[in-house]
Amino acid sequence: MSEMILVAEDLHKSFGQTQAVRGITFGIRQGEVFSLLGPNGAGKTTTISILSCLIEPTSGDATVARHSVRREPLHVKRAIGVVPQDIALYPTLSARENLLFWGRMYNLGGIELRKRVEEVLEKVGLRERAGDRIEAFSGGMKRRINLAVGLLHRPQLVFMDEPTVGIDPQSRRNILDMVKTLNEQGMTVLFTTHYMEEAQELSRRIGIIDHGKLIALGTLQELTLLVGQEEAVELSIASDHSTPELLAALSQVAGVKQVTSENGTVRLLTLSGNAALPDLITVANARGVRVTGVAVREPNLEGVFLHLTGRALRD
Amino acid sequence: MRKIVALTLKELTIIVRDRTALLLMLAAPLALTLILNFALGGLGGGLEQIAVVVVNQDDGDLGQALEDLLTSDDLSDLLASSTAEDQEEARVLVDDDEAAAAIMIPAGLTKRVTSAEGEPAHIVIYGNPARPISAGVVRGVVERFAQQVAAGAVGAEVTVTQLILSGRMSPDQVEEAAPAIGRRVAMASVDRQLITLQEVLAEGGSSDGFDALAYYAPSMAILFLMFTMISSARTFLTERDAGTLARLRTTPTREGELLGGKIIGVLATGLLQMSVLIMATRLIMGVDWGEPLAVGILVLLVVAATAAMGLVIAALVRSASQANVLGSAVVMVLAGVGGSFIPRQSYPVWLQTVGYIGPNSWGIEGFQKLASGARLGDLTAEIIALLVLATTFFVIAMLASRRSFR
Amino acid sequence: MMRQLLAIAVNDLRVEFSSRSVWISFVILPLLFTAIIGVATGSAGSDTDADDRIPIALVNQDGGPVAAAFAEALANSEVVRPEPNEEAQALAELEAAMVEAMVVLPQGFSEGLLAGESVEIPLHLSPTDNSSLAAREAVLAAASRVSRELLAARFSVEEAEALRPFVDEEERDAYYSEALDLAEQAADSPPLQVKTTQAAESATPRIATGFSQSSPGQLVTWGLATLLSGAVLLVSERTMGTLRRLVTMPTGKGVILAGKILGRFTLGVIQMAIMIVFGQLILGVNWGNSPAAMAMVALSFGLAATAFGIFIATVVRTENQADGMVTLATFLLAPLGGAWFPLEITPVSFQTVAQVLPTTWAMRGFTDVIVRGQGPQGVLLECAVLLGFATVFFALGIWRFKYE
């Protein structure tokens, strides 16, 4: 059992009246990929900000690479690499110039810095474009350099905040593959996302976060067990047809555990989607409601999320 | 320490690659220096070819003398004179903004003045309110003429009065002798000055008039330095918005290093700008800024004070574009009261005092002194003032930013 | 369509006023500044009151009657304020720029002049600027006046002597003294004087002379700054993407742009109105000679400036660049158009070239209304030129405008 490289203990953070983080506790083992999964506004960025010593928690503490986030921020920062959600690069400087600058901010210098910059450029596959200004890069390329900066000083632990938001599929694939490669080479990774597929693909353990709280924590298997063997069924109907009576009627169908509706999509949890479907459609039709789309999903994190919160993971 | 260097170099690199910034930092002040020098070189002396209309209704010597003076070759550079037959015609020309003034020489002027009795005679100048300064110059010329005439008349009056009082002549005799006396006194006093001035110019001054170049080179440099410093300080906000500030904070860099690096970056930008401007104006326009060491120290102080001012503005606003709006307004005001376009000496004293709140007024004064040959020791007032401004602004900025950056 | 246009305009105004600092640069500073600059330039050049006269040092080492007369002539000057002092201290003050000039009346000054000699007196001037030149003129004027009185007295004595010689030195001196006194009196009311008048309708009180220049000058400057900043707003909307969003709606591109133009134009007009009212009511500037003419010029200028702002938005890419260009344009167009100093004092060639700037025509128009008391017909030319500028820049701007 490898040791815990990061331990967050009862973190709280309030901004004035707003409570962004309400008692988050979890640990990350050395060498694992851990993801924080949750919808927008759940508190992911705030949590990562606390762990990167950017903001101070209102209460609670975290230990990263044996250093306290509250008391020894400089030490923590030396051990971590941060890849923020914003493209925090200087647009009129070239990729190489950016890396050289940020490397210096990470206490690197001289020939070692230059070598390392080339290495990292190679890693993210942008060696040929290194002399071009960031402003000329596509969104995906920018994110790759964004990642590269976080790796310069060979940190023990990398924090990535929503690393694949808003980029083309190819760049996204590239980044996800890179995370895997990094992890194979021994890097511990903490990343936040609201994409269930990423969390499922990359991480061993996942923490589901909503409204500032960790509502579930464990491996993918452990989490899906929470919802038992339930499958999620989605029915698309006209939004003004989803009346409480309809929902009540649907929930009477055998095997249906939970029914919610959002914007013309009725979501149900049931033991067997295939078994329940015919009855579900009959019930709907009997009420004069046309079903225009049907989806059956096997147990997955979205189902978990739905089960726990009654809402969809994606907005 | 190395990090501060890296941070500074980053600031400089970014600025140097920004073409609009360079335009504002370098091209604009150089262009304005040249243009203003051309436009205002010889403030007041730049007036030329003032259009005047002369209406001479006098049939005597005096009227003719004035008309001749106004149309003479001597004044042909200053005045573009024409004559008119009647006063109405002349007034219309002025009303239509075709002349700066009309000079009405009334009928019977010579007779009135030489008879030296009764009400004084008047030459009337009908001025164009849209050209007050030109009209003023014309008035000056005519008044000087009147004074010359008065000199003769005063002499004649005094002589005649005393001759009667001392019994040397009777009133009737005086009346007969008057014209002759008048002529004699006119000849005796024309162009004679008993008291002449020996002008001693303080070090380095020239008597050629207002040296526009020596004024506008530093004043424009400092004006656009103010813009640059506000812009540069504003990057605190733009970096915050872009996320690079946050990223800097996640690196193992102390807050002090970050702050120091940014501030030194701002200072370095200002120093770079001033150095280039000083060298450019020296090479291209031949401006002599003065003793190098003193100039260097003054530059340092002016940059420090303006940079601190920029920091205050950045600390007081909430967004980068607010900084622009407030910054432009502040610079506009300081440019006015600090004398960036019009030398402050022509302002009332209280306004000059108000102007001391801006680094530009101290800077301009300091550079002017150095350009006319003063040494570092002569700049004590400026040095102290700039240090005070720099420190005060800096403290205010630090206090104000405590709120917005935590 | 009209409704959407108005909605866009109103929304832009709302965005503009969502931050409080805009009031500072929109109203407070312009008004404050107009007042300050008006006072400053009103006192420049023309008659000043006692406290504002240029200080010069007067070192009277003579103490005789002619020196006294000279001192009095200087004291009566409307341009300089003589401050009696010792030489050493006066030199120090001159060096410290506390006085602009130093006049020395050396020992033997009065004696020499009374004896009929010419005398040269030292005049120390501080490094060249307007004030020291003005001081020099004032000292020359005082010297000239005293000289005249002396010459008059001397002449009278000569004439008298030619008719009947004096009994003795004493009688001669007495005659001379009497002559000087008479001369001084006579010089106070010379037989030939110069009177200045102006056209009746535009008689503005002297104290407003400064404001007659500064009020329109500041109007043009701040109005320009406000209207040109429309460029910044446009560019920021472009980069933010809200502009593109507007375009995807069932609203014509023309309507969008027109709405934005209207919004910015309205803002500028409101500001100008505030400044004009302030100028009229508080500063006593005669804007009200012909409200129609004044409105014509203000609106034409507003259009020209708004149009130029749109044009700027088409030549820059980032908000930063827009800010820079707006600043640059303001600080070039305003002073060179005569908003900061009257173009009157510039060479004729400069005045001709300055006609390419819209600000020159705006200033001319405003001056026509305030100072020359012109009505709508008198400002037709200026308005036409300004509208011409507006047309050209609107055309260029709209043609080149990119929505993303």
Image: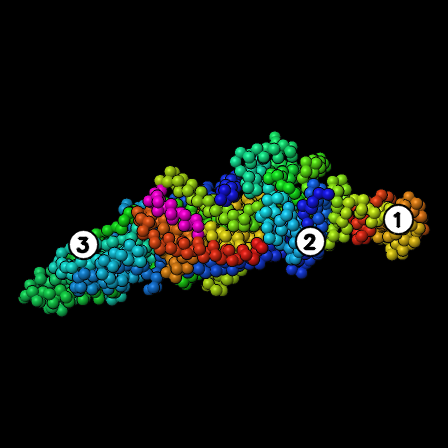
The residue mark sitting in front, 1 or 2, is 2
At horizontal 22% and vertical 58% (from top left) the residue drawn is C87
Q: Is residue B291 magenta?
A: yes
Q: Determine the chain carrying the residue at label 3.
A: C
Q: Are marks 1 and 2 on the same chain?
A: yes
Q: Are there few (<14), some (14-19), or many (20+) residues within 10 Å of tag 3?
A: some
Q: Quadrant of residue C403?
A: top right
Q: Position of residue C384 (x, y in %)?
A: 52, 48
Whether residue A287 is visible, yes or no, is yes
Q: Pick whichever, B225 or B32, lies toward us.
A: B225
Q: Amino acid at mark 1?
A: Thr
Q: Which residue is mark 1?
A: A270
Residue range of the region highlighted in magenta in the rendering:
B287-305
**In the image: residue B73, left or right of residue A215:** left
- Label at residue C120: 3
Q: Marks 3 and 2: CB-CB under 8 Å?
A: no
Whether residue C25 is visible, yes or no, is no
**In the image: residue B190, left or right of residue B376:** left
Total tally of numbered discs in the picture:
3
Question: Residue pushed farthest top?
Answer: A128
At horizontal 32% and vertical 45% (from top left) the residue drawn is B77
Q: Are marks 3 and 2 on the same chain?
A: no
Instruction: State which tag comes first along the sequence, 1 or 2.
Output: 2
**In the image: residue C76, left or right of residue B295:** left
Q: Amino acid at mark 2?
A: Glu
Q: Marks 1 and 3: CB-CB under 8 Å?
A: no
Q: Which residue is mark 2?
A: A9
Q: Is residue C231 magenta?
A: no
Element under disc 3: strand
Q: Position of residue B396 (x, y in %)?
A: 49, 57
Q: Pick whichever, C100 or C367, lies toward us.
A: C100
Q: Amino acid at mark 3?
A: Glu
